[in-house]
Amino acid sequence: MTPLAKLLEAALFASATPIPEAALSAIAAHADDADATLESALEELRLHYDTDGHGVELIAVAGGWQILTRPEYTEAIERAQLAARPQRLSTAALETLAIIAYRQPIGRSEIEEIRGVGAGAILKSLHERGLIDVVGRGEGLGRPLHYGTTPSFLEQFALRHLEELPRADELAIALRAPRQATPPGGVSAPANKGNGEAPPRAD
Amino acid sequence: MDDVNGDSAGPLVMGAMTAGSMSAGSLAVAESAASEVFVVELAEYSGPLDLLLTLIRDEQIDIYDIPIARIAEQFLARISSLKLDEAADYLEMAARLVRIKAQTLLPRREGEDLWDDPRAELVRRLLEYQQVREVVDVLERRSEDRRGRFARAYSQQSVQIPLAGKLSLSLPELLSAVDRVLRLARKPHIHDVVPRALDVDGAIGIVRALLAIRARAQWKDILPKKAEPWEVLSLLLALLELAKRGELRLLQPHAFAAFEITRDSSSEAA
């Protein structure tokens, strides 16, 4: 390995959290290794872990890089009680998180409107987990708190950046698409029937 | 892998998410005294929209043409069988469905081609919610992937303070050190009180004399070289006093800059 790749390996090993790209560049600049750039050294390290058979691998996450154990050893590590997987989030919490990730900055009332359920306690627990944070205050009555996702959210959901989530128009049902544009499954599209809308069935 | 929190209604011991799940409509909350955590029987659904969407999917109904009476009936049946009818959010949705049902039953005038479907808002919300569920699937996959990997568990070592080495000191050195300390302690500085320390009137005279010759001056022009503190203070008070009387203007262009003293021409004219 080039000296820079070794240096980066040491730095990544020493850090418990992903090292941001900028911090790695600073390390690379000090290393003064003419043979390798930051990109080439990271790629070298990644290949080194992948091809030579290591228990860990180099992962790009949350705008930085991190050395993580390979999934096939998770069971054994957990059985030995060396580390524990974090608790899974409930569906309700994931729904709230999904809304915040797409609509941030977003206030509590908007989240509640979309989910149809009160969100106060869920917001509190997501905040305690460090997944969301208050990012400002909205206009309007009481200047409600606005929430947004944190870098820790990216890390815990193995995302490099928010853009890695599917775009709204890539989802199977486009949110604001006109009714005619998305006939459900093509079985029946009552919207196109006749000269107006289909009368509702009242059974 | 079976999604413990979402799709099964079995009891689950949870800490942080307890309160959140409660508001999502789960009931039968019992506090176990032993472990100080809530035991929550999680509801099958994460909210009324979830329940509604499940009904629509189970019945293979076209989401754009919901048979509202049938769905309302099933919704009510489902929440009473699940004992969810205490949860306000579900009741609110049930009321909404009943209202939409009533609206669809109202007779419409002939030739009223622009008809406002009372179900439109519900459909919009259902579609929006379905999108959220899709993102939840993505997030679930992602977090499952991440949960299967461990980062290095870094724990900060407590810093050891290095102990100083043995002192090698002779008796005369120690005594002279003690002497130095005592000599410093022997002379406490007592403040000297000077009667009538400030001479503001005299300073006013100095400033007036200077402004009689020059229209503008600077602080350093009026301050004598090696000024005593009382002189500085007297001059400062004199300047403020004269500024108050309107005989001069003080201008400081920015913080900590030397200020300019200008004769106030307006008061002179008057």
Image (cartoon, coloured by chain):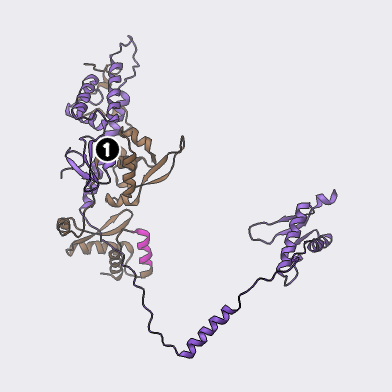
Q: Residues within 10 Å of mark 1 (few under 14, many from 20)?
A: many
Q: Which quadrant of the structure image shows residue B249?
A: bottom right
Residue wearing tag 1: B22
| Residue under the image location 64 percent in, 61 percent down | B256
Measured as percent of width and height from the top left, residue B164 is found at 38, 80
Tint applied to chain B in the drawing:
purple
Q: Is residue B10 above or below residue A187?
A: below
Q: Bounds of the magenta span? A: A19-29
The rendered magenta stretch, by its main secondary structure, is classed as helix
| Residue under the image location 41 percent in, 41 percent down | A145
Residue under mark 1: which chain is it in?
A: B
Measured as percent of width and height from the top left, residue A51 is found at 18, 63
Left or right: A117 as drawn, with respect to B35: right
Tint applied to chain A in the drawing:
brown
Left or right: B239 as drawn, with respect to A8: right
* Residue in the foreground of this view, choosing between B34 and B241: B34
Q: Is residue B114 above or below residue A113?
A: above
